[in-house]
């Protein structure tokens, strides 16, 4: 009898151990970025709130997020990806390593409207950039959000040289070493450098000044008002519909946690409370908006 009880207990434990199916939660940016910490927090929250799935954070930076996006398409039933507006832009470039945006669907909008900043350790304003004439600006990947921002700098100077880096973290190192004139990043990631007097924020996207940092428009440069970044989670259209809906609910709950809300507050983004159908409609609208914006992106030299 005791032996049967032990065998039954072992089988029960084994079944429970196998019950949690692994879902890889990818990010196409550096593991050292602020967004990477957010992915880790979301995984922790979702794992804490249920035991049907085990969410595991993974980071595959490179090619403007295309490496991570293609991994999702190769593993469509058990992989999701978090991305910024670059996710939509990148799909319009470099078909050899790119991906079709219509192969994905929206799962959850985490944050909307976070400002992107142009920063430098050499210059303090757009007027100084104009006077400098020839300048370099660092991006992360052809067809990325930073590539779009950099391409639009031609309105300031015709002598802009775009320098491509594996990641924005790598670009920051060269900013601090004064090897490149300007670079693009999120305000939250750069603010510590500003506080330490190691870098200056030249301008931010959007329509309002934040923490005293001027917008592009306030310095006479138009076009950057509506290109702040959004952060969301996407899945392949081949992921089972029931699973997509379940992950939507889990992400919605996890995104409400105080730690994650504090992260978005630092990023100065808002967290839209959209239904699942509204999220799907938002995805389609964003795909078209950024497809239109992609015509402004200039090829790398």
Image (cartoon, rainbow, N blue to C red):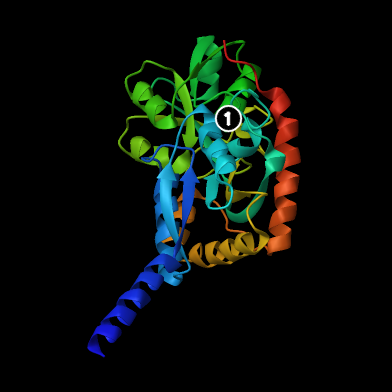
**Left or right of 234 in this view: 136:** left
Residue at 57% over, 36% down? 70
Quadrant of the drawing holding the N terminus: bottom left
Front-most of 279 and 181? Answer: 279
Residue at 48% over, 68% down? 52
Quadrant of the drawing holding the C terminus: top right
Residue 214, given in percent of the width and then of the height, sits at: 54, 36
Front-most of 225 and 40? Answer: 40
Extreme-left residue of the structure: 2
**Left or right of 95 in this view: 125:** left
Q: Is residue 258 visible?
A: no
Residue at 60% over, 56% down? 108
**Left or right of 194 in this view: 298:** right
Residue 297, given in percent of the width and then of the height, sits at: 66, 23
- From what the image shows, is residue 228 above or below residue 4? above
Residue 39, given in percent of the width and then of the height, sits at: 44, 51
Front-most of 33 and 106? Answer: 106
Residue 152, given in percent of the width and then of the height, sits at: 64, 23
Front-most of 38 and 189? Answer: 38
Instruction: Give the structural element (helix, strand or loop) at label 1.
Output: loop
How many residues crowd around disc 1 within 10 Å: few (fewer than 14), some, or many (20 or more)? many
Q: Would you name the residue on which mark 1 appears?
A: 144
Residue 69: quadrant of the picture: top right
**Left or right of 284 in this view: 122:** left
- From what the image shows, is residue 173 above or below residue 187? above
Q: Is residue 56 visible?
A: yes
């Amino acid at each position: 009898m005791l032996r049967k009880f032990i065998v039954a207990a072992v089988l029960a434990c084994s079944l429970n151990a196998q019950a949690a199916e692994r879902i890889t939660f990818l990010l196409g940016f550096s593991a050292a970025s602020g967004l990477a910490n957010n992915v880790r927090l979301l995984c922790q929250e979702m794992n804490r709130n249920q035991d049907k799935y085990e969410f595991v954070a993974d980071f595959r930076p490179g090619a403007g997020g295309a490496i991570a996006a293609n991994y999702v398409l190769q593993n469509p039933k058990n992989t999701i990806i978090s991305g910024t507006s670059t996710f939509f832009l990148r799909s319009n470039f470099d078909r050899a390593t790119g991906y079709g945006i219509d192969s994905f669907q929206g799962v959850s909008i985490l944050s909307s409207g976070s400002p992107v900043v142009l920063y430098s350790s050499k210059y303090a304003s757009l007027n100084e950039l104009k006077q400098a004439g020839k300048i370099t600006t660092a991006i992360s990947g052809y067809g990325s959000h930073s590539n779009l921002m950099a391409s639009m700098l031609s309105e300031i100077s015709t002598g802009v040289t775009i320098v491509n880096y594996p990641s924005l973290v790598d670009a920051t190192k060269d900013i601090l070493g004064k090897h490149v004139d300007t670079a693009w990043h999120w305000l939250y990631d750069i603010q510590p450098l500003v506080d330490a007097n190691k870098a200056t924020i030249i301008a931010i996207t959007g329509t309002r000044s934040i923490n005293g940092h001027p917008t592009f428009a306030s310095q006479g440069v138009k076009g950057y008002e509506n290109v702040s970044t959004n952060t969301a989670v996407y899945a392949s259209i081949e992921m089972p519909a029931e699973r997509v809906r379940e992950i939507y609910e889990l992400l919605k709950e996890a995104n409400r946690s105080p730690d994650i809300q504090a992260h978005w507050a630092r990023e100065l983004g808002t967290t839209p409370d959209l239904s699942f159908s509204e999220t799907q409609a938002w995805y389609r609208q964003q795909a078209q908006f950024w497809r239109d914006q992609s015509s402004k992106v200039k090829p790398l030299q």
